[in-house]
Amino acid sequence: MIRSATAAQGAGVAPGAAVLTPDNRDQVLDLLTGALRTGVDVKVREDIYDAPRVTPEELRDLIVDDLPEGSVDAAAVVDEVRRRILPYCKNEASPRFAGFADTGADVAALAGAVLAVFAQQNLINQSFDSPSATFVDVAVLRWLRDLVGYANPPVGKVADVWDVGGVVTQGGTGSNAVAMMLAREHAGPGTMRDGVRDPGRFKLVVPAGIGHYSVKGALAWIGCGESLLEVPVSGYRYDLEALRRALRAHRGEVMGVVAYAGDSRTQTVDDLAAVHDVVRGQDPGIWLHADACWGLLCAFTDRLRHKIDGIELYDSITVDAHKVMEVPYTLSALLVRDPGVLRTITTYSDLIMRETFAFGQVTPFTGSRAWESLKLWAMMRARGRAGLAAMAEHRLDTVAAFSALVDTHPRLARLHDPDLTAVVFAYLPSGHDPARPDVERLNRVNRAIHDQVLREGRWHLHQFSLADGGRVAPGAEVWPLRFLGGNARTTADHLAELVGEVARLGRLHDTP
Amino acid sequence: MIRSATAAQGAGVAPGAAVLTPDNRDQVLDLLTGALRTGVDVKVREDIYDAPRVTPEELRDLIVDDLPEGSVDAAAVVDEVRRRILPYCKNEASPRFAGFADTGADVAALAGAVLAVFAQQNLINQSFDSPSATFVDVAVLRWLRDLVGYANPPVGKVADVWDVGGVVTQGGTGSNAVAMMLAREHAGPGTMRDGVRDPGRFKLVVPAGIGHYSVKGALAWIGCGESLLEVPVSGYRYDLEALRRALRAHRGEVMGVVAYAGDSRTQTVDDLAAVHDVVRGQDPGIWLHADACWGLLCAFTDRLRHKIDGIELYDSITVDAHKVMEVPYTLSALLVRDPGVLRTITTYSDLIMRETFAFGQVTPFTGSRAWESLKLWAMMRARGRAGLAAMAEHRLDTVAAFSALVDTHPRLARLHDPDLTAVVFAYLPSGHDPARPDVERLNRVNRAIHDQVLREGRWHLHQFSLADGGRVAPGAEVWPLRFLGGNARTTADHLAELVGEVARLGRLHDTP
């Protein structure tokens, strides 16, 4: 016999009867409030880590164990998370986490994320799984479209998901994969139905050395193979003449061109209008995709807006809110100039999607989908255009301040003039001469600095390989450091301390 | 000049200065605790909706508006969510939401979800983005592997992500898409690099009429086209002779066979061992995929375990925790028999994944990834094997109780003997004779019942088309109702009331 919920589940958070019910509401609320307080205190911590750094193998042996036989109280599990797991988590909201700024610390966004956990809407369909949440998706997508310069139809004309002009995805990689599928179907109509038959027709042009792995991955995932055409760059932007030559040489084989509004290394914003003109001049049928995961920031303030002029001419644009808008993981969107184009990659089922506003029809790789958009809706609602502008401008000020510290330091050099929030810089070994650089030594000391920064865990800087544009070791592959000015808690004192720390480590590791 | 965080951001949750800092910690905690209480009170509500049901267009006009110019307090935004949006959200934890049971109401899982929002780990890499969280993924994947009968290497032998044997994904659709990519690469090694050239070689066998849209979608997404081979079923299981014939007729063209451990309609568990034997007997090179989104439940209790015997012989298995384990959206996993096979679909970047435990290397369509596994870790840790068994057995009791009510009602009929938690049933119009059914009238009354149930919003039942197995209208396409017994709050009283309501609506709509 089944028992009533009261009899079976009502005795607080008892072992084995661990679902939230009206009867245990107060005890559960206490427990969850404690978890919430723990979470808040992780974020406000000045330190990145709450425990000494240990190796992956040590963490593996500490955490990975067998599923227990018996039940325990949920409170005991929360305590275990606090003790065994959380101390080793990074706190990206720390003002010393300076290589990325996925802080997830926007207050309204945090409230939205908490509400979304409990509301448990499923964006796969509108009618019974997310009646109002679907329109929070719609609102956010229209706000983002408006910011990048895509036209929105009047609200009353939005008759179905194909009038919205975008989809919420879990990240830039997912958004870019959807864009590549649109490009594939555009180059070969019917490919969704018939499959890929000639991957040589689905080549993708990317800027050499700064393309993001996601588009290369997407080509492999969607059956086009590794059909990348890498076009030379100059100053981390397309060499337009080389782009023209490549398109001419591969006429009829190029399905798309990707331009970066802030690449994933120096965050350089390409000359989007010029790239557009070159591509359209060669072949109006090529899909033009702008990856604005970072560059969305330009849409927030007039100080940056001109940098993305022309983005509204692109067929699709990826934006990534968790990268630049301090919302908790994850939230990205793919926006499309012509909303109706999403019809070309629709999937359909009578199971739960036979309705006009079911986003499940236009989200490849995704069926059930959590209500990620609420946190971004809350963030944008709270800040408004004025708040978004203030946020972007504060970051530009931080970047200017950090750049000035690097520029005035005798042993540091910037590798570029920042367009956005990234400052890529290097420690110069003693006796360094850009005309005759010891590249091996330059890279050795900067990699040693980065290794020690990560090992100590007091600061975080990012590192990657990059073709030097001519400032420290012209043309060479170098391994510089990257600062990212996206954290509102990073003060002038932090910046000065960070520069001092890099210089100290540089001296320490600068051995001939 | 940049200002200090204290000056710029410290004044509480002021407009335009809305990030969590040490200075506003107490005010923010108050605000978030209020949001948490709202969320808890949504879930403990008896009702599914907190407002009258309105049309999609009315919700669109109510919610979709322009991005405001000015900033407002986060508290005002939370109030707006409470007022304008939440009342229209479905509450799937309501004991009257009976067509699905994605309750998300497990207490430990809710605590895990809250902690994960604040911890803000990114599972794309281990070293700096999710040092310990990566091993929570590993632990959960190993627990799930153990439950389905896949062997795990000793913890100390897990040297990298390719020793884990699975990936956490956002849902069954994502898991199935990864499985299809594995099948594609297995059938055509090098396809990741070279692309699809002959989609006719990548056919997928599914059971006719009960296959899930996700695998059809996946084939279209990954470039194989709509290469489905639908094989006849009997009693919602493969007709094994027909399966053998199909494989023989398409020798060399079939990349994979999907078998359902609980299909998405009646939740019938196929004869997995027999399907395995037929497939392997025809062609040992065919990828065998088990979709156990629902059938994972069988792994929890000896009362069901025998139903999935043989699943451990399959090359890959999809499980879906948010469907059957009361964890908040979303959490699914793809498990693979041979862990090393994930190497065949690896993507790689030096940007942030050059390390042994970076899951970003083996999660197609996904780069940055939120810490979804913590909520499942917490749920399984709290319940243990004993608690999982108790949960599954309680559901079986609920299903038996509901089935008995249907069976004893003169105007209701079950369409199958439930394997799991679904009971598919129909209201029989007066004078109904299974030997000479009026299918149009049967469907009309059941669709009218379902329409009214959804329109009124007091209950939720699911509905879909199904080939009748011989109980109400042999061989015809019918539109029955589905009850799903997966909610711990659904009492015997609720079941009786629900059956009465269906019968009342049936009488109301039963017009000749």
Image (cartoon, coloured by chain):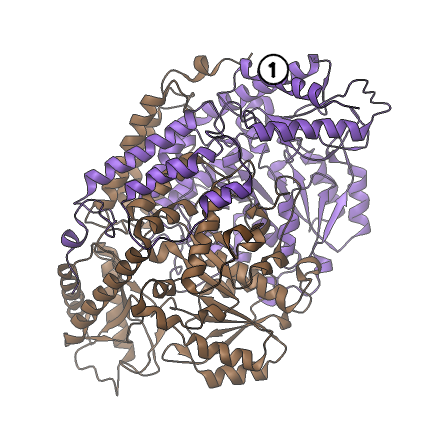
Chain colours: A purple, B brown
Query: Quadrant of the image for the C terminus of chain B?
Result: bottom left
**Residue A475 falls in image quadrant:** top right
As displayed, is residue B51 above or below residue A200? above
Which residue corresponds to the image point at 40% horizontal and 52% vertical from the top-left?
A357
Which secondary structure, mark 1?
Answer: helix
Place of residue B96 in the rendered image (x, y in percent of width and height, measured from the top left) = 21, 56
As displayed, is residue A472 above or below residue B55? above
Residue type of the residue flagged with mark 1: Ala
- Please tell me which residue lies in front, B108 or B507: B108
Which residue corresponds to the image point at 20% horizontal and 46% vertical from the top-left?
B45
Q: Which residue lies furthest to the right in this view?
A: A436
- Please tell me which residue lies in front, A9 or A213: A9
Place of residue B373 in the rendered image (x, y in percent of width and height, measured from the top left) = 43, 47
Q: How crowded is mark 1: few (under 14 residues within 10 Å), some or many (20 or more)?
A: some
| Residue linked to disc 1 | A401
Query: Quadrant of the image for the N terminus of chain B?
Result: top right
